[in-house]
Structures are given as C-alpha cells and as structure tokens.
Amino acid sequence: MKQRPIWNAHLAGAVLGLVLLLTFVMTGHGLGASGAPTAIAAATSNVVAPTATQANGYLGWMVENGRNPLNSWIIWEVLGVALGALAAAWWSGHLHVRIEGPPRIKSMGRLSLALIAGVLSGFGARVSAGCTSGLGLSGSATLATAGFVFLIGFFGAGLITGLLTRRMWK
Amino acid sequence: MHTSDIFIPTTYLWATLLGGALIGVGMGLGGYCPGTSVVGAAAGRIDGMVFFVGLILGVVAFAGIYTPITPLMNAAAGPQAQTLGQLLGLPAWAVLMLLAGVAVAVWWFTRRNGTSAAITCAD
C-alpha cells in the first residue's frame, strides 16, 4: 500500500490537545494509559491467585466484592486508542508486523529490551500513580504541580538514558 | 461544568519524581511510553506488544512490594490537587504566559535540529 507522509508533529500535538480538552469537558478527567495494564494485572492476578490478590495491599480493592477491574473507563479508552492507531496505520500505509528497536541489536535482543523497558515503566507508573499520559499530559494540562514534577523526572532520566545508549541506535 | 469537577493530581514529591524517572528510562530503552506502546502494538510492532506485557508484569512487581514501600509512596506529599499557580502564587494566565515563553525558547534553541518531518517513529 502507498505510504502517506506522517503528520507534522506540531499539528498532531494541537489535535491531541483538542482531544484532551474534549475529554476533560465530557468526563472531568483527562486521558490515561497505565491504568489499563494495571486493571489487566489485577484481573489476571485474581484468576491465577485469587486469595493473594484479594489480600494484596495495592490490588485488593480493585477486585473486592467480586468487582471486575476490566469494567472501567480506561480499558475502553485504551481500546479506542488501539483502534485509532490501527486505522491510522492502515490508512497511512504504516501497518507492518515487525520488531523495531536499535538497528545494532537483533530481534531477540530488541524484544528483551522492550520487556525490560516495559517492566520498568509499568512499575514506575504505579510509583507515580500515573504515566506520561495521565500525569505528564493530562496533569500538566490542568497546571497541576504533580504533572510538572513528573515531567522533570521523566525528561531528566530520559535524557540521561538517551545519552548513555546513543551508540546503540546508530 | 465547573472547574472543581476537573481532576487535578496531587504531588508526592519522591514517588512522582521516581515514577517519572523510571518511565523516562523505559522510554529511552524501549522507545515507548505506556500510551505509545498501545499505538505501536496496534500498528503491528511486536516490540510494542512485548513492552505492553512488560507493563503488566511491572504492575504485578509493584503490587508485590507495595506494603513495605508505602512510606516512600506517601513521603513529601504536597497540598491536595495543587496547581503551579497556587505553588508560585501567580494567577493561571501568568503561568500560561510563562509556559508559552518556555515553548518559544525550546523552539528557538532546537530550530536548527531538523523538523518533525524527519521523525520516522512507527513508520
């Protein structure tokens, strides 16, 4: 399929801002992401080890009294994000099943790196009670101090990691 | 709607900073943040799918040690739902002007480093 050029990042950012504004007007909260893997973790853990999950200090309330953590707005929102990404990737000719990552690293290495990075991010998102979407984007859009504190940690560590791993991406 | 209906997160200084830093390291190593890993996965990127599975495992790991680290999570808590304006003692419009100034400064200092058209993320 013919590839269409990707949007100008500033234009895409402005559109994302309008979507975020609309979400605030309609729901009172902004956009999020890390709540979805959290809900999936609680639901899965409750199937595999129900007693331990219900007794857990963090996941317990999400599954108490037979509550289903997957029945939450963020699951639907993230499904919408996935559908939108699928549609955009298909329409623009960028839909490809492949493994991306640092050019110098082969497939298994890239997947290992992705898994390690995902674990760090999933853990981190629970430490800060929100990720780039919930705190960095939606939090700072409300001018919340927490959003900007998050972004200082995010960009600071991202910058250092980027500098340290720069050779890997060449 | 009233502005009091809008959710404003609260700062827990060390937890907010540390969590942000871990997600920054994850982005530097994996090329995704939690939200964009969903986008990458839906566009067929297998590393995006693996990153998302990693997110779930990371949550399980956090839940495993949550009780002992609770004091760190709640340390140095800021006022509930504090905004930058309240922190700095400025009206919201002044904070927005400051942020607009930061945006112009970032544009000025990075204007030579290629344009967004050069970005080929998830191509």
Image (spheres, rainbow, N blue to C red):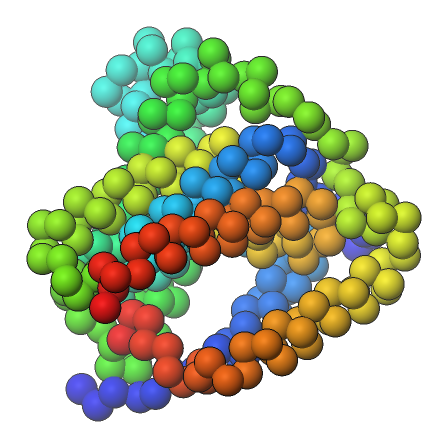
The residue nearer to you, when weighing A164 against A32, is: A164
Which corner quadrant of the image does residue B116 belong to?
bottom left
Looking at the rendering, in which quadrant would you find the N terminus of chain A? bottom left
What residue do we see at 71% from left, 45% from top? A145
**Relative horizontal placement of residue A78, taking residue B102 as reference (left or right):** left
Looking at the rendering, in which quadrant would you find the C terminus of chain A? bottom left
The answer to whether residue A54 is seen in the rendering is yes
Is A103 situated above or below A40?
below
**Percent position of residue A70, x then y:** 40, 36
**Percent position of residue B99, x then y:** 73, 65
**Relative horizontal placement of residue B106, taking residue B63 as reference (left or right):** right
The residue nearer to you, when weighing A86 against A120, is: A120
Is B114 situated above or below A95?
below
**Percent position of residue A104, x then y:** 14, 62
**Relative horizontal placement of residue B5, taking residue B116 as reference (left or right):** right
The residue nearer to you, when weighing A40 against B19, is: B19
What residue do we see at 48% from left, 42% from top? B21
The answer to whether residue B45 is seen in the rendering is no
Number of numbered discs overlaid on the protein picture? 0
**Relative horizontal placement of residue A161, taking residue B94 as reference (left or right):** left
**Percent position of residue B30, x then y:** 30, 52
What residue do we see at 55% from left, 69% from top? A16
What residue do we see at 34% from left, 53% from top? A164
Is B70 situated above or below B43?
above
Is A35 situated above or below A161?
above
